[in-house]
Amino acid sequence: MSSPSSTAAATIPAVGRIHLPALAVSSLVLVTTALAFVFFVAPNDQSLGFAQRIFYFHVSIAFTAYACFICGAWQALRHLWKRDPRADLASYVCVHQGLIFGTLVLITGSIWAKIAWGRWWIWSEDELVLFLVLYLFYGAYFMLRFSVDPGPQRANLSAVYALFGVVLIPVSFAAIRLAKAYFHPEVFTLHGPNFGGWILVTYCIAQVAMLVLAYTLYRLELGSKRLDVRLRRLREVLA
Amino acid sequence: MAAYPGRVLTARRLGKRYGEKRVLRGIDLGLPRGGFLVVTGPNGAGKTTLLRICAGLAQPTEGTIERGAARAQVGYLGHEPLVYRELTALENLELYGRLYRVPERRERIGMLLERFGLWEARHERVAAYSRGMTQRLALCRVLLHEPELLVLDEPYSALDEAGAELLDAQLAELCGERSLLVSTHDPARVQPFASGSLALST
Amino acid sequence: MTYIRDVGALARKDLLLELRARDTLPAMLLFVAAVFVVFHFAVPGTPSRLETTGLLWVAILFTALLGLGRAFVPEREQRTFDGLVLAPCDRSAIWLAKSIATLAFLVAAEVVALPLYALFFHPIGGATVLAVLLADLGICGVGTFLGAMAVVTRARDLLLPLLFLPLAMPIVVGAVGASVVASPGRYLLLLALYDLLFAVVCWASFEYVVAE
């Protein structure tokens, strides 16, 4: 832990190597570009029309959420294994971002279902159901975290739970696929358009934009949380 | 691995924080093999926390602690007796005897129960014991595996006079043979055995 | 192997504690019977075999939760967790022993619950019984682990169902699937895979749950 005398002024301490303002600007640029591509460049879908474009965001956000959860588990592993003192907070912020993006997945997925089939929820869309389960799982992560006082024990419990989550993802997915066999076969299934040409380009831009946005938000939140911790330590030393 | 081979406990600038509350700060401690260190201080000074860290039940948030004794060689007596109330004295000691792989378990349990005056009550559930009897059973538990390092947190607190005398006799026997870290509100009682003392303040 | 002996000593302790206290198992039995009665009144019309099989698994899951909530109560209330953590045994032995003891109670409860279900609703086949056994392993392994986590928090009993139910989804799918489908092989395999995977994760990480 850094000694009080070496603390810089109230600037957000550097968390990664990329300069934060540059990151923020690039994510703004990328998201704007993505929006532009999604609305103007991508071709109209044959069956669903203009409104289908939400698909680009839905899939890219979903992938980003998975990436956040996996990162969270990776940081959790580093906390448990390498005893890295910074890993616990990083893991928490990853999971938090994952949950935020997960909320967006559920919302965009619901909108997409409404567009395609006129219903706000579809049980036959595997990935949507999986996100619902994960949402409940990581929601419980927060309940767990807020129910324990800050300290090594809270960090350990959170880390172990985050690892459980990552094991749950493939097992749940397999379970959801298998479950379809004993439900009434529903006519509603959603599938994305055939990838090719501008569709692929638009999707890639949206995906990169979402990932960069997630990383920016992660750096922002982590930086501010680290500053909180530092301020508290300082206050204590001065008290 | 102890920094000093002759020491069973070495703590440097030990600190412990629970959330926002700081309980210990800047503690330096050295317990040589065969030594008897008495820890004193008012309530809330952090004696229990310090002893828990020394026994290995808690991790410090600052500083370092090095133990020259493995987990199997440490005996801890805390505020709680750490015995199961729904089990009998015998069953409790059997469990710990098995977990600590005590050789000649039955004989040792019998010997300890007799020494602390619990032999007749050995088949009764601990829930039926008086506080003094429970504390004596806790002492049996601590001594069962003949630990190298004994960490006792206010061992006299729940004992009646007869029990306290038994403990005096036990401490006299252990003094010099094993290493002891004892916290107490009554330092005069353990003064004859002590080789050093540490006073904590809030 | 000393590990097995440690697990044996600890499991024996857990079973002894329950036999003396005599509260968890009777509670689970009464609970499962009451739940069946609730199902009867709660499901209008004549439910098919498919639907009542689902209800069986809901009953088993929540009855298990009832038992799991009690698993670490002696350790919590009497602070005896410290005693176990100080002992030189491998920490995962604590989890394994507690899971075995919980499994014993759950199976004991099911020995009554399954015939009761057959009496009230529909008879059960061999695949269902096999699914019950496999599912029990997963429920007890993961549930005991989460019970230990929940016990150190402020929310305690409130937290265990929240932690457990999302993780229990694959068990429900595997168990219900195996009970209703003509060829239950894939579902039993899912259950077995779940049990194995999470047993390994629980076994490897219990150490971090008890360390402070």
Image (cartoon, coloured by chain):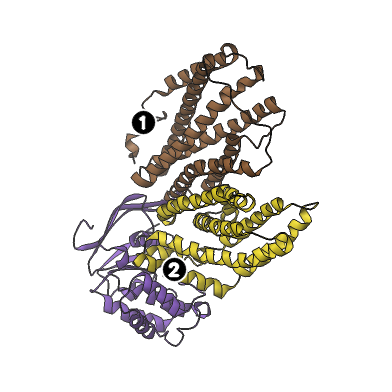
Chain colours: A brown, B purple, C yellow
Foreground pick, C21 / B118: C21
Q: Which mark is residue C92?
A: none
Residue B79 seen by the camera? no
Amino acid carrying mark 1 in the image: Ala
Foreground pick, B194 / C30: C30
Which residue is outermost to the front? Answer: C182
Where is A4 relative to C155, above or below? above
Q: Secondary structure at mark 2?
A: helix
Chain under label 1?
Answer: A
Q: Position of residue B153 (x, y in %)?
A: 38, 68
Where is A82 relative to A41, above or below? below
Residue B68 seen by the camera? yes
Check if mark 1's residue and mark 2's residue have beta carbons within 8 Å: no
**Residue carrying label 2:** C10
Q: What residue is at 59 percent from the left and 24 percent from the top?
A: A55
**Residue carrying label 1:** A8
Foreground pick, A184 / C194: A184
Q: Position of residue B24 (x, y in %)?
A: 38, 54
Which residue is outermost to the top? Answer: A40
Q: Label 1 to label 2, Cα distance in Å?
A: 52 Å
Which residue is outermost to the bottom? Answer: B120
In the drawing, does residue A53 fall left or right of residue B95? right
Foreground pick, A150 / C207: C207
For discs 1 and 2, the disc positioned in front in the rendered view:
2
Res. A70 image quadrant = top left
Q: Position of residue A105 (x, y in %)?
A: 58, 31
